[in-house]
Structure formats: structure tokens, C-alpha cells
Image: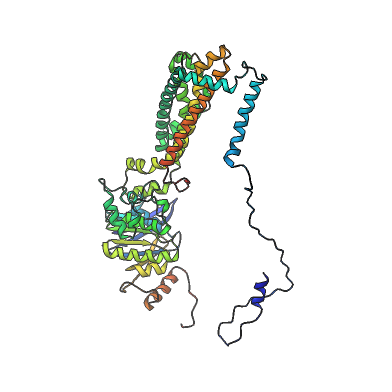
Amino acid sequence: MHIRGLTKAFDQRAVIDGLDLDIRPGEFVALLGRSGCGKSTLLRILAGLDAEIDGLVSVPSQRAVAFQAPRLMPWKRVWQNVVLGLPGNPDRTLAQRYLDEVGLSGKTRVWPKTLSGGEAQRVSLARALVREPDLLLLDEPFGALDALTRVNAQRLVADLWVKHGCAVLLVTHDVEEALLLADRVLVMDDGVISHEVSVELPRPRQVGHPILVRLRTELLGRLGIVEPATAGE
Amino acid sequence: MSTHQTSTLPAVPDDGAVVPAARQPEYPGRSVARVEIRPARTTSRRSVPRPLRRAAGPIGTLLLWWLLSATGVLSPEVLASPVTVFGKALSMIADGELPTAIAVSGQRVALGFLIGALVGTALALVAGLLRLGEDLVDSTVGMFRTLPWVGLIPLFIIWFGINEEPKIALIALGVTFPIYFNIYAGIRGVDAQLVEAGRVLGLRRWGLIRHVVLPGALPGALVGLRYALGTAWLALVWAEQVNASQGIGYLMNNAQQFFQTDVIVVCLVTYAVLGLLCDLIVRLATKYGLAWRANFEGA
């Protein structure tokens, strides 16, 4: 995926201002930024939802998105939600395979209203993966989940990424989440990528790893948050 | 409450622990107003069962009616007695008069409803799905909506004559508006986030309409359907007052000329039962069609 000089303006005000970004095939990139910095706008542009832009954007044709809210069609059963929009008329077995992957084997035929928040988000993930995307766009997919559910969902995403090998762009405001999951963590500010760190640690990663702790402080600083000094430092 | 107080008083023996024992401060001067929450007393002591209580009103009214008729206070020219009405209903069913009338009136309603529903739905789709359609259609429908449609009967007679056409047209007109407004509002009430999700999933225009917009508009459409059916029967009553040579309204008009109040009551009850039946069908359709809804309580 390549972006060169991407500019997006709302009412003359540039939210994204000459942004450059490359993501290699199979790379997991996390995008951090304060709320309103344009990171979600960038994701919408990459998803093809917003074409009123300037600049050059080249993305894989096979893309999939998981939003912050699961956005399941309440009038379709879980499996129908998963295969919705796929060419041909895929049957339930295809959906079943991907629902198995996200640990929802038994929920194939239920209505979305019966799912918990975490389950609905996993269906949304299955719906994205069934498209076998080359680029998976995740827009704060764990933001609305409770802390415990979020940990499990993050592990699930890590496992699925290893299995499917697609490039991932994860938009988040959770620094730890970004460091746990991504090869590269970008900070977006003033409409451009203002900072970038590579996380070269084997997975699965521990939050308490000294390198992660150091990167966390660095990234939080870039986001304008100074951590209180602890007794040990 | 007193047991709680005693338990806090003896301090935990000081064993030099780093963490101090949880301290519960005491406020000796503090007075607390208290209420006791008692278990609610059940009021079912020898009370009449609810269904029976609910039936008491209608049955009482019926009894009163019968009593007034039997004692001659209510003369048959004003209102026939319930016994006469019931007997008349049975004989009208037996000689085929009522079933034939129901068939004729039912056909009018069905045809008028079908035409009105088709027109209303088509207009709602055009206005709901296309912005151009909205601009052209919505204000126009809004304008016609303000016309008192029952008042159009004289005009309809001039246009369509006095046979079936003006009756069906009146029913169709009455049905069009509730169908139009509810489907239109239903379409515009579909969550834009779901439409966006549908686009991301690769749905094109027709796919979006079929899989996202129309199912999303279904709850509104069903509300419209219920309104429309109610209106259809009402419109039928109005329409059949005019030059009907058969049907329930014809029976009523005939009965009026011979002061047959029993027949009039039978016809009125028939209208009510048919309307109720339609409502029941829509309610069942709602139950099965909207089983996915989170706010649906019957599942």
C-alpha cells in the first residue's frame, strides 16, 4: 500500500495534509493519534468510503474493514452477516469456517441481538476475514469492549494475523495495544505521520517488557502525555 | 443495624502489619432516619380473577342492553335486542346473505388496498431512495395528503361513475398515504452506519437496497400496513354508503329503509370483526417478520 501527498480537507481545513505512508504486504501497522487528528478519516479513505481527496493512494483491491461498532445487520443471522456482499451465493459452510476461527462455532444461526459486545465484534472480524483481504483495516475495533474482553480480542487478532498473513492497519488510541500487536507504530499529528517506531520483539509480547515500557513512554510523550516519574527511575 | 455497629467497635489487634486494618469511622452524633421495607402484601385474597374482571364490563353492557330491550325501554325501532341481533346474524349467515356481502366488500377492500399499497410503496421507494425523487414526490404527496379524502367522493362519482370504481379508488386513496409516509420514514430511518458497512462489504446499489435499506425499513412498513388496513375498512364504510347494490354497506342502507336495526348492528359488528381480523394478521406478520428486533418482546 502506498500513499503519497494525501490531502483531505473539510471546509478548507486540511485534516490530512500531504501524508506519505507505505505498508508492506503482511505488515502489521498501528496508527496512534489524539482524537480528531484525522486517523479515522485516513482509514475511511483507504476503505474507499471517501474519495474527495488530493494525492496518490494505491491500495490492494482486496480490503476489509472492521469498525469500532460491529455494524452487523440486525435482520440477518450471524452467518448471513459474515457472507453478506460476497460474490456468488456462498452458503453457510464458508461462514462456518470463519466463525470457527473467531471461536463462535455455536452462534452461526442466531440473530445478532443475542450476541454480547465481544461476540458481535468477533463476528465483524470474521466478516472481514472471509473476504481474504490483502489489507485489513481496523478502526479501534476493541475500543468499546471491556478490559478483559479486549485482551482476548487482541490475542485473537494477533493469531488471525499470523494465520492469514494480510497487512493490517490498526487505528487505535491505546498505546499498549499498538505496541503489543504491531510491527510498526505510527503517530499521526497535524495531518501527517509525525513519528514512527519499529517494534522488533518476538510475539507474544508482554506489556511489562523493558523495551515496550520505554517505547510506551516515548509514544505517550509524542501524544502529549508526560508520565509521572516513578521511584525506580 | 445494631449488629453492624458492635462488629466494628473492637479494633483489630495491632500486629504491626504494614497495611492498617480497615477503619470504620463512627459518628456518634449522627441520627439516621429509617424506613422499613416490608415485603409487598399480595392482594389476591379471594379476588376475582383478572380475565373475569376484564370481561365484566362488556358482558355487563350486553346484559344491560338485553334488559332494556326485554323490558321494552329500548324499542326495536331504536335498537334491536341482542337476542334478535344474534338470531338475525345466524339466519343471515345461513341464507348466504352475509357471506355474499362479506365477499363483495372484502373484494373491494382487497383490490383498493392492493392498488393503494402499490402506489404508496412505489412513491415511498422513489422518494426514499433518490434525493431527486424526494424533491419531486414528497412535497406533492404532502399536498394531496391535506385533502380530506372522504370529501372526494362526489368528484370520484363524477369521474368513475357509481359502480365499483369510485369505491375502490376511495379505498386506494386512503391506503396510499399511511403506506407512503411510513415506508418513506422507514427508509430514511435506516442507520447510515449500516449502509456504510454494506458499501464496504462490496454491496452495490441494488444490493444495498435489498439487504440493508429495505429490511431496515420493514418495521416502519409494517406500522404503515396496520394503519392502512384500518383506513381501508373505514374507507369501505364511506364508499359503500354511496349507491352500493351489494356488499355490507348495501345491506345496511337497505335495513335503514325498513328500520331493521338488527341488520344494521349485524353489519356494524361484521365490519368490526373483519377489521380486527386484518389487524391480527398484520400483528402475526410483525411477530415473524421482526423476530430479529432487539426490542421485540415476544420471542
Check the image and name the residue furthest to the front.
B46
- Residue B240 in picture, x, y percent from top left: 50, 18
Residue ID at (66%, 59%):
B37
- Residue A221 in picture, x, y percent from top left: 44, 71
Q: Is residue B60 above or below residue B287?
A: above
- Residue B131 in picture, x, y percent from top left: 41, 37
Q: How is the image coloured?
A: rainbow
Q: Is residue A10 above or below residue B112?
A: below
**Left or right position of A231 against A125:** right
Quadrant of res A38 = bottom left
Q: Nearer the viewer, residue A129 or A195?
A: A129
Q: Is residue A18 above or below residue B160?
A: below
Q: Nearer the viewer, residue B181 or A222?
A: B181
Q: Is residue B50 above or below residue A25?
A: above
Q: Is any part of residue B243 visible from this angle?
A: yes
**Left or right position of A166 against B255:** left
**Left or right position of B224 against B206:** right
- Residue A6 in picture, x, y percent from top left: 35, 56
